[in-house]
Amino acid sequence: MNSEDSIYFDFRRLEFHFREKAYRMSRTELLALEALFLAENPTRVKPEEIAQYIWGVRIPSETRKRTASVLVCHVRDRLMGSDIAIIASNSTGFKLVLPKDK
């Protein structure tokens, strides 16, 4: 990414900013996206890691894991056209893919 690719989470306005464009999201969708950005291993983020980040639960219930997965799908839909990709894998979780430097 380059300096034009600034990223900003605005929890007051419930927006994610990337490349001077704002994407409206719910608070939990913003938290799910933030969890992907802040993950220790952004190439493999499990739904339970996202659930723990959002709800602060160490061992989330199956329902919370599924809810986290659905939230990531919503985030992916909201980021359509942004050059940010979230790739899902049943075996490893989610991978956040940012555009390369131009």
Image (spheres, rainbow, N blue to C red):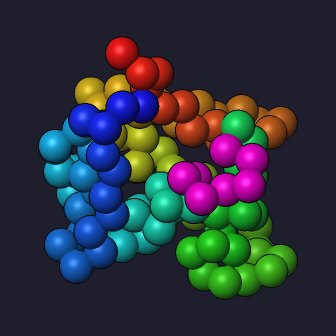
Residue nearest the viewer, comparing 102 with 19? 102
Residue positioned 74% across, 55% down in the render = 40
The residue segment tinted magenta is 36-42
Q: Confirm whether residue 66 shows in the render.
A: no
Q: Is residue 24 left or right of residue 95?
A: left
Q: Is residue 16 left or right of residue 101?
A: left
Most distant residue in the bottom direction: 56
Compared to 40, does 28 lie above or below? below
Q: Is residue 86 left or right of residue 20?
A: right
Q: Is residue 11 left or right of residue 95?
A: left
| Quarter of the image that includes the N terminus | top left
Q: Residue 38, image x and y in percent? A: 60, 59
Q: Residue 86, image x and y in percent? A: 52, 36
Task: Examine the image and state in which quarter residue 20 appears.
Answer: top left
Q: Residue 26, image x and y in percent? A: 31, 67
Q: Residue 34, image x and y in percent? A: 49, 61
Task: Examine the image and state in which quarter residue 66 appears.
Answer: bottom right
Compared to 21, does 61 lie above or below? below
Residue positioned 83% across, 77% down in the render = 59
Residue nearest the viewer, comparing 102 with 50? 102
Task: Examine the image and state in which quarter residue 49 appears.
Answer: bottom right
Residue positioned 27% across, 27% down in the render = 81
Q: Confirm whether residue 90 shows in the render.
A: yes
Residue nearest the viewer, comparing 99 with 66? 99
Q: Does the magenta segment cover residue 63?
A: no
Residue nearest the viewer, comparing 72 with 85? 85
| Quarter of the image that includes the C terminus | top left
